[in-house]
Image (spheres, helix red, strand yellow):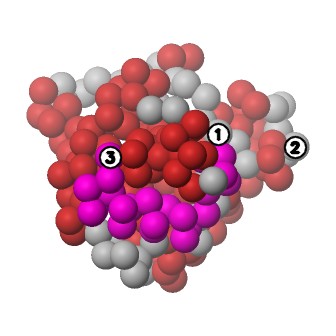
Amino acid sequence: MGTSRAKEWTGMPAEVAGGDSLSALMTAYQSGDGGAFEALYGALAPQVGGYLRALCRDATRAEDLLQETFLQVHRSRRTYLPSRPVKPWIYAIARHVFLMSCRSTSRRQRHETIADEALPEIPVPPEVARLADRDALQRALGAIPADRREALLLRHVWGLSFREVGAVQGVTEAAAKLRAHRGVVGLRTLLGSSRGGS
């Protein structure tokens, strides 16, 4: 499902398809246009895939979760309200798919941990990248509580508004701001202590 379909359907590359065109794609898909789904997938799969990789820290598992996310989008397409933005709706589905996967995995393996060396790269906001080397940033991001890290990444890496971050996380806009802020403060604290100890 390539970006050529997204460009054909919206008249623009998938990377720049805005909220209005995403809503139009979703509405067309609800009406039975299979090409609209391909375009929607092409426009959002890279971002949603990055979000899932940051959540689960396993590229192979993230790819499986991405496929499951879009399967759930297909199954839930009738519940989408055209007056609402598409991105937070799909990110919320992705988050739900991730959480359900965690629950089933934890039932099977209660105490599995992954070594830091095995973790894939977590995206780092450019403005934070100059504060420390990439490895230190990766460790610091990994040490921040998951809800704060998720809010920070959704806001500062994937560009969602705080209202959209709140919708994805199932919290208020104010709670999303607080989580992202505490994530940034935690990141600065961890980076400050790692620089002070070096």
The reply to whether the C-beta atoms of the residues labelled 3 and 1 are less than 8 Å apart is no
Give left or right: position of 81 versus 173: left
How much space separates mark 1 and mark 2, taking CA atoms? Answer: 14 Å
User: In which quarter of the view is residue 83 placed?
Assistant: bottom left
Disc 1: which residue:
123
Residue holding disc 2: 130
**Which of the pair 53/22 is nearer the observer?**
22
Location of the C terminus by quadrant is: top right
Real-space Cα distance between discs 3 and 1?
Answer: 32 Å
Q: Are marks 3 and 2 in contact (CB under 8 Å)?
A: no
Residue that label 3 marks: 34
Identity of the amino acid at label 1? Pro
Neighbourhood count class around disc 3 (C-alpha, 10 Å): few under 14, some 14–19, many 20 upward:
few
The type of residue carrying mark 2 is: Arg
- SS state under label 1: loop
Mark identifier at residue 63 = none
Query: Dot 2 lies on which element?
Result: loop
Q: Viewed as shown, does residue 166 lie left or right of 92?
A: right
Choose between 5 and 137: the one closer to the eye. Answer: 5
Among numbered discs 1 and 2, the one appearing first in the sequence? 1
Percent from the top left, x then y, of residue 55?
44, 42
Residue lying at 22% horizontally and 68% vertically, measured from the top left:
79
Predominant secondary structure in magenta? helix
- Residue 159 drawn at (x, y percent): 64, 60
Residue 188's quadrant in the figure? bottom right
| SS assignment at label 3 | helix
Placement of 176 over or under 3, stated as above or below: below
